[in-house]
Image (spheres, coloured by chain):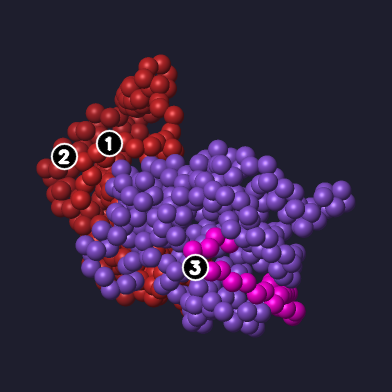
Chain colours: A red, B purple
């Protein structure tokens, strides 16, 4: 039912000031600025270390990295490692997010359980989760499971904490409104609490996306013979600095892609929040 | 007497809360008796902390009285009641829903079809002159329009009585006047029984048929003032009536505001 006379853009009460079309603040000049900075940085990387006499086994130049990259693709089965890292990071992120959010909602629904468990949650939150990696390897062996478990554990807590916090700070008047309309606990949960927690959940997912890459990297550094983290230790053993650099760059790219995917989901889920306030 | 015409009837209602220190009891309202007849617009004024909002929570069934009885159409209130609509200073629109979907919210706990829900929501939006904004999101509306959308949501449940808790106090002076007129028209044209809780004395005078004055905590009703002015459906006409000023002066005296300002 779309009223025919509906204006395309009704009243814009909370819209931000439009960015200037030209001059230093305009989007074009910001983009050009960022791009020039990046190019300048790459140029400095390429020419400065040799000029200062830094050998390439300490800081390889950009062209060294490119050459090593081609060799890694041809000789080291790079794509297998990339696929392994991406798969475990994504799976760990999805599982960790799901468990973290579910736990957050459960604790948010029950004040009693939340109060009983909160000191332990705080303790586990502070504990360095990546330090569990060797333990998981001792338990599960040199395979994909320890890496997955570390990733899940690392992702779990920020999402749990974010969801729980949003459940605890929800507007009481909204709950009362739903109660006054004779809604039951489950209806209040699905119609008010879950949608109201979306901004916090999305913020948690964003943190989780970056942490997932850290989790999988540590897992791969500590044990196993696949993944970009493994290539870092492998390259280190061979004093192949360029390989280590390349693996770090690729891990960063994996993180960026994961983060970008979360941002895209967030834009769809939180479409009702004006852009400037997100 | 004409008992049947009473929509809301409070008889000797007292509400006590545990004080923050936990040991003693705070009396929020003390033996409050009031009634609202069908189609009547009653305003409750009083100093802040006099328990105005406590009355609202009790009538809405969100809280239970410590003593006394609350009757809605002759039936005791024993929990959230589908025949009470309430509105606060905050519009409480759900930001993730479109306006029409927000208006449907109050009907979702009822067993009516999706199509009928949508139909009723659109009817209320038309009554509140928001049809063009049915598919907009709350952030795209001004504060005054959002309050009108909240009124549409309140009216969609076809309440026996509407409780308004300072619904205009977050708005600027001009928007407030326009919205008071808009609300008055909507309420008068549909003959809805209304209880308005406000600290704005002029608002009470220009919008209501009868004003109840409450004392400081523990809140009691200290005076009842029938407003004998024409144009209840047009607060803008009432505001310029000389006698409106007299009512406000009377309320000022009744609440001892002059003495307090001097102290």
Chain at tag 2 = A
Chain at tag 1 = A
Pair 3/1: label in front: 3
Crowding at dot 1, Cα within 10 Å, few <14 / some 14-19 / many 20+, comes out as few
Dot 1 and dot 2 residues touching (CB under 8 Å) = no
- On the image, the x and y values in percent for residue B216 come to 75, 64
Residue B185: in sight, yes or no?
yes
Q: Where is B234 relative to B22, above or below?
A: above
Mark 1 to mark 2: distance in Å? 55 Å
Q: Residue at 76%, 57% (x, y): give it.
A: B255
Asked whether B7 or A260 is in front, the reply is B7
Q: Which residue is mark 3?
A: B38
Q: Main secondary structure of the magenta part?
A: strand
Crowding at dot 3, Cα within 10 Å, few <14 / some 14-19 / many 20+, comes out as some
SS at mark 3?
A: loop
Q: Which residue is mark 1?
A: A8
| Start-end of magenta stretch | B15-42
Q: Which residue is mark 2?
A: A71
- Assess whether residue B18 is covered by the magenta stretch: yes
Total marks placed: 3
- Assess whether residue A165 is covered by the magenta stretch: no
Dot 2 and dot 3 residues touching (CB under 8 Å) = no
- On the image, the x and y values in percent for residue B17 come to 67, 76
Determine whether, in the image, residue B241 is placed left or right of residue A61: right
- On the image, the x and y values in percent for residue A154 come to 38, 61
Q: Residue at 34%, 55% (x, y): give it.
A: B124
SS at mark 2?
A: helix
Asked whether B92 or B128 is in front, the reply is B128
- On the image, the x and y values in percent for residue B262 come to 87, 48
SS at mark 1?
A: loop
Asked whether B122 or A206 is in front, the reply is B122
């Amino acid at each position: 039912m779309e009223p025919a006379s509906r204006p395309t853009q009704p009243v814009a009460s909370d819209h931000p000031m439009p960015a200037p079309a030209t001059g230093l603040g305009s989007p074009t000049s910001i983009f050009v600025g960022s791009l020039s900075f990046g190019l300048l940085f790459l140029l400095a990387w390429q020419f400065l270390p040799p000029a200062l006499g830094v050998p390439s086994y300490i800081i390889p130049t950009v062209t060294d990295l490119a050459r090593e990259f081609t060799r890694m693709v041809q000789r080291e089965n790079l794509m297998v490692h990339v696929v392994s890292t991406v798969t475990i990071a994504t799976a760990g992120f999805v599982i960790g997010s799901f468990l973290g959010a579910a736990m957050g909602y459960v604790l948010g629904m029950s004040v009693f359980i939340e109060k009983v468990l909160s000191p332990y949650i705080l303790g586990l939150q502070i504990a360095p989760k990546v330090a569990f990696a060797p333990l998981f390897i001792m338990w599960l062996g040199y395979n994909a499971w320890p890496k997955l478990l570390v990733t899940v554990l690392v992702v779990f807590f920020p999402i749990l904490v974010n969801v729980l916090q949003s459940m605890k700070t929800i507007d009481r008047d909204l709950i009362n409104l739903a109660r006054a309309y004779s809604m039951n606990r489950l209806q209040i949960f699905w119609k008010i609490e879950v949608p109201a927690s979306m901004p916090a959940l999305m913020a948690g997912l964003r943190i989780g996306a970056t942490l997932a890459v850290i989790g999988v990297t540590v897992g791969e550094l500590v044990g196993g013979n696949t993944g970009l983290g493994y290539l870092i230790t492998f390259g280190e053993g061979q004093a192949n600095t360029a390989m280590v650099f390349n693996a770090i760059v690729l891990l960063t790219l994996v993180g960026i892609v994961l983060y970008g995917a979360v941002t895209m989901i967030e834009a769809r889920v939180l479409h009702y929040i004006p852009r400037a306030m997100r | 007497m004409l008992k049947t015409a009473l929509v809301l009837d409070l008889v000797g209602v007292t509400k006590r809360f545990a004080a923050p220190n936990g040991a003693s009891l705070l009396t929020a309202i003390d033996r409050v008796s009031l009634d609202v007849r069908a189609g009547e617009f009653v305003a409750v004024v009083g100093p802040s902390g006099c328990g105005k909002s406590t009355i609202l929570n009790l009538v809405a069934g969100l809280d239970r009285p410590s003593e006394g009885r609350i009757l809605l159409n002759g039936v005791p209130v024993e929990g959230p009641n589908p025949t009470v609509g309430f509105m606060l200073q905050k519009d409480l629109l759900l930001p993730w829903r479109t306006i029409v979907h927000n208006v449907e919210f109050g009907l979702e706990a009822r067993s009516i079809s999706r199509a009928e829900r949508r139909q009723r929501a659109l009817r209320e939006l038309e009554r509140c002159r928001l049809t063009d904004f049915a598919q907009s999101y709350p952030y795209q509306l001004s504060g005054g329009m959002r309050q009108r959308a909240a009124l549409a949501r309140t009216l969609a449940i076809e309440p026996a009585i509407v409780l308004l808790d300072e619904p205009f106090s977050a708005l600027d002076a001009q928007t407030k006047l326009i919205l008071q007129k808009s609300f008055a028209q909507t309420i008068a044209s549909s003959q809805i029984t209304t209880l308005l809780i406000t600290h704005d004395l002029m608002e009470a005078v220009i919008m209501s048929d009868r004003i109840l004055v409450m004392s400081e905590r523990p809140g009691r009703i200290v005076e009842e003032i029938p407003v004998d002015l024409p144009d209840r459906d047009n607060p803008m006409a009432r505001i310029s009536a000389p006698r409106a000023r007299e009512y406000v002066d009377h309320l000022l005296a009744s609440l001892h505001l002059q003495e307090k300002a001097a102290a």
